[in-house]
Image (spheres, coloured by chain):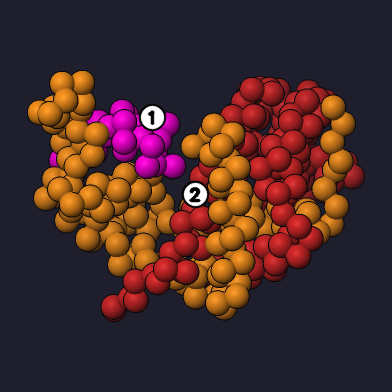
Chain colours: A red, B orange
């Protein structure tokens, strides 16, 4: 199968996307490390738990909700459990279910990391763009995300 | 310092960006691993060398040209050297300079990985977007990249 190489506009879009992804993920990981020793996949996982009313999710549900930390979820949860930020419980209403539960220390870690995280996101992406650019970016990348997910990678 | 939380449009743009970055980088790393055992930072490094007329760059120049593999460049080059894809040479015109040189095996590894890489990039991002979307994405993310670089992170 022969592929067309990228033309100038395509290449500019691709390299800008790739560079910004790498730089911003590096920056975010650095901020999270500095503000409490979390990684971006761990932050994503803790955030998902914090968004639920009772601070807990079945491992299988959690896997479906996650992107960055989906692969290696068991490992991620073990690391967070060792750090005291999450604990595992057996689901009483369903023998097969294991729950991941956000601990009070986990909630503290999130609260500590969140302001700096928000600042990095605003300063390096969101606040640089006007309203039309934000809408276009959301639409464009939601298309790509839907494709990536339907292709079985997320 | 109090930060405004993200509103709905800002959140949609941010989450779409973050998810797509994570999913696409995972997909790219998977393809590169399957097609020859490279990582995305290694692919970036080999590509930079391949783009020079004599397949070599000073380590300091290489560091400036890279994004993903910039931090830990010495480690990346050592790994690639062990795999026979790069070798290091002392620069004859400048005693202080160490050159990274793409080997013929390195060139082969790139040629082997490139078609699949291009296919992943086209299928999951570039070919999903029309011309206006590509231009907007390039402009928007070039702004973010310039900001991230000037802020000393790349």
- Chain of the residue under the numbered disc 1 shown in the image: B
Position of B44 relative to A150 (above/below): above
Q: Residue furthest front?
A: B93
Residue shown at 71% from the left, 49% from the top: A128
Position of A145 relative to A80 (above/below): below
Q: Taking B110 as reference, is B139 left or right?
A: right
Residue shown at 57% from the left, 78% from the top: B130
Q: Tell me the residue that label 1 is attached to.
A: B72
Residue shown at 38% from the left, 37% from the top: B64
What range of the chain is rendered magenta?
B59-84
The quadrant in which residue B140 appears is: bottom right
Residue A37 location (% of width, % of height): 63, 24
Position of B10 relative to A114 (above/below): below
Q: Taking A112 as reference, is A15 left or right?
A: left
Work out which quarter of the rendered image holds the N terminus of chain A and state it.
bottom left
Residue B136 sits inside the magenta stretch: no
- Chain of the residue under the numbered disc 2 shown in the image: A
Q: Taking B90 as reference, is B129 left or right?
A: right
Residue shown at 55% from the left, 62% from the top: B138
Q: Nearer the viewer, mark 1 or mark 2?
A: 2
Q: Secondary structure at mark 2?
A: helix
Q: Taking B77 as reference, is B102 left or right?
A: left
Of helix, strand and loop, which mostly describes the magenta segment? helix
Residue B77 sits inside the magenta stretch: yes
Q: Tell me the residue that label 2 is attached to.
A: A19
Work out which quarter of the rendered image holds the C terminus of chain A and state it.
bottom right
């Amino acid at each position: 199968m022969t592929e067309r190489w990228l033309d100038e506009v395509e290449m500019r879009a691709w390299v800008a996307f790739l560079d910004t992804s790498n730089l911003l993920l590096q920056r975010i990981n650095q901020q999270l490390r500095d503000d409490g020793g979390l990684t971006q996949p761990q932050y994503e996982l803790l955030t998902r738990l914090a968004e639920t009313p009772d601070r807990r999710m079945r491992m299988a549900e959690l896997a479906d909700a996650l992107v960055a930390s989906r692969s290696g979820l068991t490992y991620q949860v073990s690391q967070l459990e060792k750090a005291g930020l999450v604990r595992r419980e057996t689901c009483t209403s369903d023998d097969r279910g294991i729950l991941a539960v956000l601990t009070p220390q986990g909630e503290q870690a999130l609260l500590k990391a969140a302001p700096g995280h928000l600042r990095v996101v605003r300063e390096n992406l969101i606040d640089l763009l006007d309203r039309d650019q934000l809408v276009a970016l959301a639409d464009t990348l939601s298309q790509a995300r839907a494709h990536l997910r339907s292709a079985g990678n997320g």
